[in-house]
Each structure stands twice: as structure tokens, then as C-alpha cells.
Amino acid sequence: MPIFIIGEIGINHNGDLSIARDLIDVAKDAGCDAVKFQKRTIDLVYKQDFLDGPRESPWGTTQREQKEGLEFGQMEYREIDAYCKQGKIEWFASSWDIESQKFLRQFNLNYNKVASAMLVHEDLIKEIASEKKHTFISTGMSTLTEIDKAVEIFNDADCPFELMHCVSTYPMADEDANLNGIKTLRERYECNVGYSGHEVGLAISYAAAALGITSLERHITLDRAMYGSDQAASVEPNGLRQLVGAVRKIEAAMGDGVIDVIEKEVPVAQSLRAHVPFIASQR
């Protein structure tokens, strides 16, 4: 199966539905299979004293105003749902609390996502697993023991899933990628493993594609200079087109691993080895 490529919009829309639509268009044009958002119930995810704290943003001077400014609600997600259906591209979201997961059910999405930060939220992942939808589980900032527990929950619920190797720094330094962790996860859990990247550039994602990942997720943006904590670790439109195109070439280039003379090599061998007695006698 081809690598399932996800354009992670997250909160890079900055609370603006027109930016969200533009990012959906960018992902569709580049050849992504899906786009992903993030859904939070602000008062459940953040403590009151944190929300009352200071933070300068385009929406005001408190943390609450910034968080609420970035959050889409019923109207926006209905628009996103309709727009993605019209554009024939999948969409889904990572929920950060149980109420958000219940909110997403109204859209009958085909996929779920467990964000790295939520992998240890057992009540939430039990709720997600109960839906029995194919779920992408990111493993950033998690120990093997914590991943063991999440995998156990999904197996017990008979919910299909794949893990996504991830390092949760924004942006991630290349030397922290630990791509061999993809093999570790695949061997330990005997499941498909993808890669969720937060690096600057594309080389690490190319390498992950060559390691046999089944899914690839990268944050996307219209401009890395835009406001937002995820923008610096995101891929701009031209880079996304380059990424998807290169990943598809890498997939085709990997082959089946069988060593033999391919048909296209036969005339080349006959020409270049014509002076070799054994080869010449076989002509």
C-alpha cells in the first residue's frame, strides 16, 4: 500500500477559516491523502490560572484569548467537512479531551489520531479506541512502557491502529530524529509504523520513507513566518509538493528486493559484455 500522507494543519489556520481552506487546497494540490486538525475544549485542557495568565497575541493579552482565538467550533468544522468532501480529500483531527472526541463523531470521519501529548491520557485513548476506526498513534515524548499501555488498550478494543515514530520538539534537530526507532517500534509491536516529523527541511522525511513507513505526517503552512508556535516546524506549499513527489518516487524505487537481471538490462548486458566469451555465447 502507498504511504498515507497527511498534511497536518493543526492550528496553523490561526482561527481563520479562509486560511484553513487555503491549506486544504495546498494539501490536495500536493497530493496528500488527508489533512488533520486539532480539537480542544479549552476549559478542560487548560487550568483556570493558566488561562488567566498573560500572553500577547492577535486576539488579546491573555492565554485564554489566544487559545480561544485559535479554536474552531461547530460552524467552522461543518465548513471544513463540506469543503473536504467537495475537494475529495479526507480530514480528521486529534482530540485533546473526551468532549472534543465526542464532538468529532458527528462528522463520521474515517480516521482518528492520538497526539503524542495525549498518549498517556488513558481515558481519552479508551474513548478513541471504542470507535474502532483506524487510528494513528504518535509516540513522541513517550517511554516504551507508556506505548505498551496504549497498544494494549487498542488491541483489547480490537481497534485498528498504526504507531507513528515522533520526536516532540518544534522544530526538531536532525540529530534527534532517531529514525531507527521506526524499526524498533515495528519489531516490538508487530504493527505498521509511520513517521510524524517536526524537522526543518525534507531530508529526514525522505529517509523515513525509505525505511518502509506506512504513513507520513508533516505540519503544513502558507508561510513559515506566520504567527504560531508550529509554523517554524511546518512545510510551505512548494516544499509540500516536492515532499509528496519525492516520497512517491522513493516508494517506486524501493522495489521488491529480489536480485536478478531485469528485462531492461538484457540489451545493455549484451552490448557491454559482447567481448566476454561466456556472454557472447549466450547471445
Image (cartoon, helix red, strand yellow):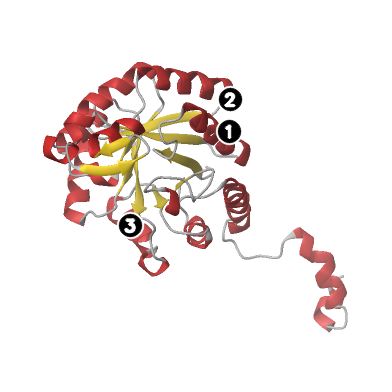
Q: Residue at x 32, y 50 (%)?
A: 190
Residue 126 visible in the shown view? no
- Neighbour tally class for label 2: few under 14, some 14-19, many 20 plus, Cα within 10 Å: few
Is 89 in front, or is 144? 89
251 sits left or right of 20 in the view:
right
- Residue 204 in the image: state x and y as whole percent: 48, 61
180 sits left or right of 211 in the view:
left
> To which quarter of the image does residue 160 belong?
top left
Mark in the foreground, 2 or 1 = 1
Q: Closer to the N terminus: mark 3 or mark 2?
A: 2
Q: CA distance from mark 3 to mark 2?
A: 32 Å
Q: Residue at x 36, y 18 (%)?
A: 74
Is 241 in front, or is 75? 75
Q: Residue at x 84, y 66 (%)?
A: 267
Assign a secondary structure to mark 3: loop
Q: Amino acid at mark 2?
A: Gly
Q: Which residue is mark 3?
A: 169
- Residue 97 in the image: state x and y as whole percent: 22, 31
Assign a secondary structure to mark 2: helix
Q: Which residue is mark 1?
A: 25
Image height check: is 45 above or below 217? above
Residue 14 visible in the shown view? yes
Q: How many marks?
A: 3
Q: Closer to the N terminus: mark 2 or mark 1?
A: 1
- Neighbour tally class for label 3: few under 14, some 14-19, many 20 plus, Cα within 10 Å: some
Q: Which residue is mark 2?
A: 87
Is 185 in front, or is 270? 185
Image height check: is 239 above or below 73? below
Q: Amino acid at mark 1?
A: Asp
Quadrant holding the C terminus: bottom right
